[in-house]
Image (cartoon, helix red, strand yellow):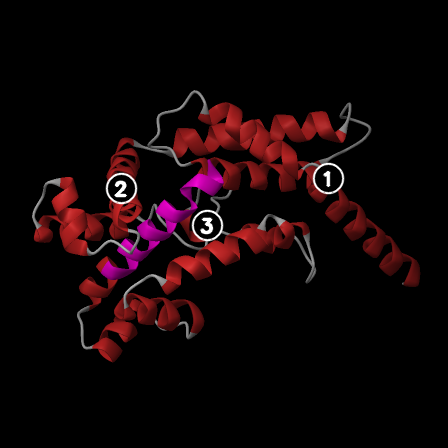
Amino acid sequence: MEKHAAHSQDYEKWREKNILEYAYLVKYIAARFAMRLPSTVFFDELVSAGSLGLIDAVDKFDPDKHVSLKTYAQYRIKGAILDELRSMDKYSRSMRKKIQDITKAVKRIEDEKGTSATDMEVSQELGIGLNDYYNILTDIHRSSVLSLDEFIKTKKNDASSNTRFQSGIKGDDNPADRFDRKEIKLMLVQTIQTLSEKEQMVVSLYYYDELTLKEIGEVLSLTESRICQIHTAILIKLKARLQNYFN
C-alpha cells in the first residue's frame, strides 16, 4: 500500500515537472499557427487548446512507443490546436469577427481618452445605433465564444464536458498557477478598477459571490438580458486590455 502511494506521488511530481518544462512549447506552436490565421481567431484560444494537448501528451506518453516526450508533446499540441480550429464553424467565426470589431473600437476609444469606453461611445465608433450594439452583445453572449474562465474544449469538442486547464493538474501549487498569473491578475485588477460602478458590481456578484446573471438582475433591478449585455461588454473590455499581453 505504501509502495503504491509512493509511486503515485512520484508520478504526480514527474507529471507536474514535465508540464511545466514543456509549457513554453504551447505558446511557441500557437504563435506559429497565429501567423497564418486571420485576426478573428484569438491567440489565447489557440494557447488553451494547445495546453490541453500538452496535458494529454504527458498523460499518455509511453517511452517504449515514443521517441521523446518533447517530440510527442509537439505532435499532440499541434493536433489539439488543429482540432480546435476545425471546430470553429462559420457562425462562431462571425461572432469572433464581431468581438474583434468591438475590441478594436474599445481600444481606440480608451487609448484616446484614457478612461473606460461607454456603450454609447462604442456604438458610435462602430457606426451603429445603441440598440443594435446591445443586440450584438446579446448574440455574442448566446454564442458562448467568450469567457473570462478561458474554458478549454475536450478532445470530443463536447460543450457539456468543458473543463478548465487548472483542473487538468492536481495540487495547490501547479504549473497552471504559474503561467504568467501575477501579470494577468495585475492587469485584470487595474482594468476592473476603470469600469463603471455598475460594471464592477456585476463582476463582484458574478465572479466573487457566484450569483447567476438572473440573480444579479434582481439585485440591480435590471433584466437578465441587460445583465448578459453588461457582462459581455465587460469581457470584451478585459480582452482589449489583455490583447497586447496575449499577442
Q: Is residue 85 found left or right of 101 in the rendered image?
A: right
> Is residue 233 inside the magenta stretch?
yes
**Counting residues from the N terminus, which is met first, the one under dot 3 or under dot 1?**
1
- The residues bearing labels 3 and 2 have C-alpha atoms spaced at a distance of 24 Å
Q: Residues within 10 Å of mark 3 (few under 14, many from 20)?
A: some
| Kind of residue sitting beneath label 3 | Glu
Q: Is residue 14 found left or right of 74 in the rendered image?
A: right
Tell me, for residue 150, which label it has, or none: 3
Q: Is residue 25 found left or right of 109 in the rendered image?
A: right
> Is residue 243 inside the magenta stretch?
yes
* Foreground residue among 153 and 182: 182
* Residue on which disc 2 sits: 108
User: Secondary structure under badge 1?
Assistant: helix
Q: Residues within 10 Å of mark 2 (few under 14, many from 20)?
A: some
Q: Which region of the structure is painted magenta?
A: 230-247
Residue under the image location 20 percent in, 53 percent down: 138
In the figure, 215 relative to 90: above or below? below
Residue under the image location 7 percent in, 48 percent down: 129
Q: Residue furthest right?
A: 3
Location of the N terminus (image quadrant): bottom right
User: Secondary structure under badge 2?
Assistant: helix
